Amino acid sequence: MEEWHSQMASMFKDRTNPIRIGACLGEVISTSPWKVAIKDGKFMIDASNGYVCFQLIHHITTYSYRHSGKMTHKGCPAGPKSDYDAQGEGKIVLDELWKAGDKVLVIPDENEQHFFIVDIVKEGV
């Protein structure tokens, strides 16, 4: 039988050195509403205890262009008014990039009460 002081030391060690979750891989269960499983499905993360990086759910880029030149057809000018100028701008919107089954990087906060879903992770790329 273990001595009382050994048992007490073991209890202090367990209390003082809790097992931390740390950064881990999660699996996207659904995207609307979003839910991610970690630790082989033992824990679920959703809007009540997690945050999703904006780049996963909405990706926007803008562009503008200006171009000028001469129009030709088979090497010949395309007519008396073959010079042109063009310009424009726009926005490209890519909707949700993640989908059910994707692996994602999950990082807990300091107290491991809330989690940050950072990005999609691809293995062997």
Image (cartoon, rainbow, N blue to C red):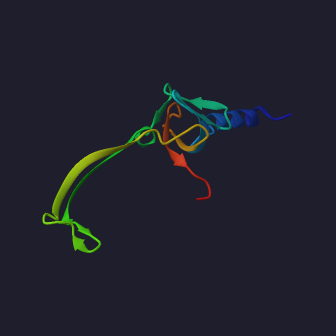
Taking the view exactly as shown, the residue that stands out farthest to the right is: 1
Residue 96: x and y in percent read: 46, 38
Viewer-closest of 14 and 37: 37
How many numbered badges does the structure rendering display? 0
Residue 3: quarter of image? top right
Taking the view exactly as shown, the residue that stands out farthest to the bottom is: 75
Say left or right for 92 vs 33: left
Taking the view exactly as shown, the residue that stands out farthest to the top is: 48
Q: Relative to residue 21, is residue 44 depicted above or below?
A: above
Residue 82: x and y in percent read: 17, 65
Viewer-closest of 123 and 78: 78
Viewer-closest of 121 and 113: 121
Taking the view exactly as shown, the residue that stands out farthest to the left is: 80
Q: Residue at 23% across / 56% down in the picture?
A: 65
Say left or right for 6 vs 115: right
Q: Residue at 58% across / 42% down in the picture?
A: 102
Task: State the quadrant of the N terminus.
Answer: top right
Q: Relative to residue 33, is residue 27 depicted above or below?
A: below
Task: State the quadrant of the C terminus.
Answer: bottom right
Q: Residue at 23% across / 73% down in the picture?
A: 76
Say left or right for 55 vs 100: left
Residue 83: quarter of image? bottom left
Residue 20: x and y in percent read: 59, 40
